[in-house]
Image (cartoon, coloured by chain):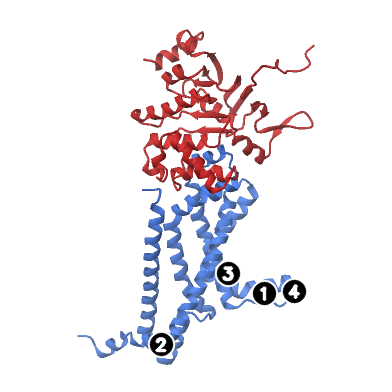
């Protein structure tokens, strides 16, 4: 007799766990039941054709999109939902959702830096407003993380004065400064000119080497192959292929995955 | 060759002669402008946020408000606030209730322009890219923080030229308060005219004065605001 659905206790509990995640926009079902878990320090790349649900999937992890059903757990804590007394999940309070989101960093395709703030102010803003840090402390941490993405000299520059690659690195510093448990990348290099993707990928690679837990939605097959510990291929809202890069790229079980890879890898 | 009478009537020196009286009048216009502009902007902020609210009833009420005040002439509104509102309030509260002409002017103009300004603010808020808000959300910021720190500072910069032209209209509209006997510049001009019977130089002077004040003020604001707006948008 099954007493619970609990999995056997493992040594390292997953940082992010999804259970049967579904998301529909009206009649359009974008995610059709996704389950997986990521242990600490793992870099997971999510690949797939456009429209396969990659971005939606990522946005469900920090509740930018509310899943239609299924659960996301961050470090064991349910994300965005709360178990009610009646045994059903209901939407969590805005304060709790915000508190959980602060532990998940996100880097966007369009950078989304705030144009009325300098690079440094972009990085310190959430430290001040969310973490309630004192000005001096936030600035010290902000400079430290700008240094980490090699932009110490651009602290006082407004985003409009920075190249796309520099803007994206500021955005990474902004997410990193919050010291998140996991970092989500939503096609972080897709909006960049080809000659600028390298500097962003280098920063991402360095983070992976430091043991940062990352979920990377990407079109950069080279990055997925070389840097990630695990690759998921999404097709029409389902995980079609899941494995270490060597297997997914070298010998995919799914015919669709094979076809997708041959269309993007030259 | 100009006739002697025409030259006389275009001689603006009589306007200068009465400068003390006229300056007192202009000051009234300025007071009314400042008070009604503050009222209009405060109302406009609340209304624009209501129009963007997720609550249906709040959107409905604020939409009615905007349509009502945007489509009523300022003059009609002013007369209504001055003559009708006190009667209405007196009956409702069953006590004697009256408004001074000054207060009625501030209320009337404030209401009228809050409608226009709220649409400007709304457009400004809506022009802030969704992604800028999502960046705040993903960092754990609460709705109010995002509004105060990310949305409004950008909206303000974007809407400034539009808002400025509405404030110019508001300042020009203050000239109608003389019709409910607020001793503003137009009121003073007509009083002097009763004495001197020289409408041409007096009213021409008033027109030029309005023009001068507005051009000077907008030029100054433009220079200051451009410097501020250009930061981050170069």
Name the residue located 38 percent from the left edge and 43 percent from the top edge.
Answer: A160
Q: CA distance from mark 4 to mark 3?
A: 22 Å
Residue under numbered circle 2: B18
Q: CA distance from mark 1 to mark 3?
A: 16 Å
- How many neighbours does mark 1 have within 10 angstroms: few (below 14), some (14-19), or many (20 or more)? some
Which chain does red denote in the image?
Answer: A
Residue under numbered circle 4: B94
Q: Is residue A229 left or right of residue A80?
A: left
Q: CA distance from mark 4 to mark 2?
A: 45 Å
Name the residue located 36 percent from the left edge and 80 percent from the top edge.
Answer: B204
Label annotation for residue B107: 3
Which chain does blue denote in the image?
Answer: B
Residue under numbered circle 1: B87
Out of A218 and A162, give the one closest to the viewer.
A162
- How many neighbours does mark 3 have within 10 angstroms: few (below 14), some (14-19), or many (20 or more)? many
Where, quadrant-wise, is the N terminus of chain A in this rendering? top right
The mark lying in front, picked from 2 and 3, is 2
């Amino acid at each position: 007799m099954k007493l619970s659905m609990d999995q056997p206790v493992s040594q390292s509990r997953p940082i992010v766990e999804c259970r049967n995640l579904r998301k529909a926009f009206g009649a359009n079902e974008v995610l059709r039941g996704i389950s997986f878990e990521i242990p600490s320090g793992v870099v997971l790349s999510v690949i797939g054709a456009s429209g396969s649900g990659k971005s939606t999937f990522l946005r469900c992890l920090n509740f930018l999109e509310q899943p239609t059903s299924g659960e996301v757990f961050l470090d064991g804590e349910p994300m965005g939902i709360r178990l009610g007394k009646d045994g059903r999940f209901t939407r969590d309070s805005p304060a709790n959702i915000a508190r959980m989101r602060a532990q998940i960093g996100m880097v966007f395709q369009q950078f989304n830096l705030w144009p009325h703030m300098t690079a440094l102010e972009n990085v310190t803003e959430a430290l001040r407003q969310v973490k309630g840090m004192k000005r001096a402390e936030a600035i010290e941490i902000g400079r430290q993380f700008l240094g980490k993405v090699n932009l110490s000299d651009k602290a006082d520059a407004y985003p409009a004065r920075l190249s796309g690659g520099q803007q994206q690195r500021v955005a990474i510093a902004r997410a990193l400064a919050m010291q998140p448990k996991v970092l989500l990348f939503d096609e972080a290099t897709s909006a960049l000119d080809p000659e600028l993707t390298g500097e962003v990928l280098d920063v991402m690679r360095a983070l992976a080497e430091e043991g940062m837990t990352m979920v990377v939605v990407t079109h950069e097959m080279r990055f997925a192959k070389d840097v990630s510990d695990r690759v998921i291929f999404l097709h029409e809202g389902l995980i079609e292929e899941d494995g270490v890069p060597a297997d997914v790229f070298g010998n995919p079980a799914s015919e669709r995955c094979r076809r997708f890879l041959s269309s993007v890898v030259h | 060759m100009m006739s002697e009478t025409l030259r006389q009537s275009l001689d603006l020196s009589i306007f200068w002669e009465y400068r003390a009286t006229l300056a007192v009048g202009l000051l009234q216009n300025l007071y009314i402008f400042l008070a009604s502009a503050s009222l209009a902007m405060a109302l406009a902020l609340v209304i624009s946020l209501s129009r963007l609210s997720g609550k249906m009833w709040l959107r409905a009420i604020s939409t009615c408000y905007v349509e009502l005040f945007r489509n009523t002439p300022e003059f009609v509104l002013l007369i209504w606030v001055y003559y009708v509102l006190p009667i209405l309030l007196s009956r409702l509260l069953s006590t004697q209730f009256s408004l001074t002409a000054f207060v009625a002017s501030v209320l009337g103009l404030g209401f009228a322009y809050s409608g226009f300004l709220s649409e400007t603010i709304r457009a400004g808020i809506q022009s802030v890219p969704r992604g800028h808000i999502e960046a705040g959300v993903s960092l754990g910021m609460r709705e109010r923080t995002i509004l105060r720190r990310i949305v409004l500072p950008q909206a303000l910069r974007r809407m400034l030229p539009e808002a400025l032209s509405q404030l110019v209209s508001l300042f020009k509209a203050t000239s109608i308060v003389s019709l409910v006997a607020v001793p503003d510049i137009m009121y003073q001009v007509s009083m002097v005219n009763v004495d001197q019977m020289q409408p041409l130089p007096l009213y021409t002077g008033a027109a030029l004065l309005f023009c001068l004040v507005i051009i000077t003020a907008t030029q100054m604001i433009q220079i200051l605001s451009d410097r501020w707006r250009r930061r981050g948008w170069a």
